[in-house]
Image (spheres, rainbow, N blue to C red):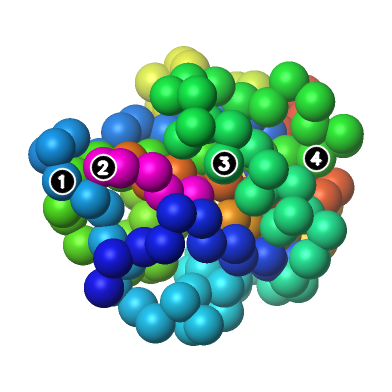
Amino acid sequence: MRCSPLLTLVLTAGLVAPACAAPSLSRPDEPVRVAAPMAEVPARLLAAHNVERALAGTPPLRWDEALAAEAEVWARELVDSGRWEHDPTLHGHGENLWTGWGSRIWTPEEMVGEWTAEKRDYVRGVFPNVSRTGDWTAVGHYTQMVWSGTTHVGCAIASRGNRSVLACRYSPPGNIDGRRAY
C-alpha cells in the first residue's frame, strides 16, 4: 500500500526532547510504503510506544489529537521543503523524527523501533549523562519515548515523492537536564 501525500496520526503520550533520527537505508528513488491499513497506524504507533514504556516501568501514554495536528504541520513542512531539522517552535513539547526513503515497506512498529533500538546505549543516570557513548543524542529518541513525566503523544506521517517523515510530539517534554528518564 502506498502512503497518501499526507497521513495524520495522533497519539497521546509522553515527551521526547529533540534528537535527530538516522535516515532509513531504503533506496531514495522509490516511494516509501507503510505496511498497515492507515486506520490502524495511530493505535499501532501508540502501542509501540507503550510496549517500551511498560518495559521501562513508566505509565502508558495517551493519544492527543492536538499534538498530532502540530506534528502534521511540521511533517508536511519537512517533506515539502526537503529539510531535516526539529521544529524551532515546539511550544513546550518534545519531538521525535524519523524519515524513510525509497520503496522499503515499513510497519509502524519498525518506524518507532528505530528509536527504541537506542536503548542498547542507554544507561540509567541523570540527564544528560544517560548514554554509554557519552552523547545523550545517541539515546534521545528512546529516552523521550519512556520519559516518566510524559503523558501524551501525537504523531503524523507526511509523504512526498520518495520520502516519508514520521513526526511525534510529546507532552510534557522529556530529556530534561538534571532529571532521570524513569
Q: Which numbered disc flags the more N-terminal residue, 3 or 4?
A: 3
| Residue 150 position (above or below residue 57) | above
Left or right, 144 with respect to 110, comes to right
Which residue in the protein does label 1 denote?
30
- The residue at 64%/37% (across/down) is 74
Alpha carbon of mark 2 to alpha carbon of mark 1: how far? Answer: 5 Å
Q: Are marks 2 and 1 in contact (CB under 8 Å)?
A: yes
Residue type of the residue flagged with mark 3: Arg
Q: Position of residue 75 (x, y in %)?
A: 57, 41
Residue type of the residue flagged with mark 1: Glu
Q: Position of residue 122 (x, y in %)?
A: 47, 38
Which residue in the protein does label 4 denote?
93
SS at mark 2 in the image: loop
Q: Which mark is residue 76?
A: 3
Alpha carbon of mark 4 to alpha carbon of mark 1: how far? Answer: 32 Å
Left or right, 138 with respect to 170, comes to left
Alpha carbon of mark 3 to alpha carbon of mark 2: how far? Answer: 14 Å
SS at mark 1 in the image: loop
Which residue in the protein does label 2 denote?
162
The secondary structure that dominates the magenta segment is: strand
Query: Badge 3, how many Cα within 10 Å: few under 14, some, many 20+?
Result: many
- The residue at 49%/83% (across/down) is 40
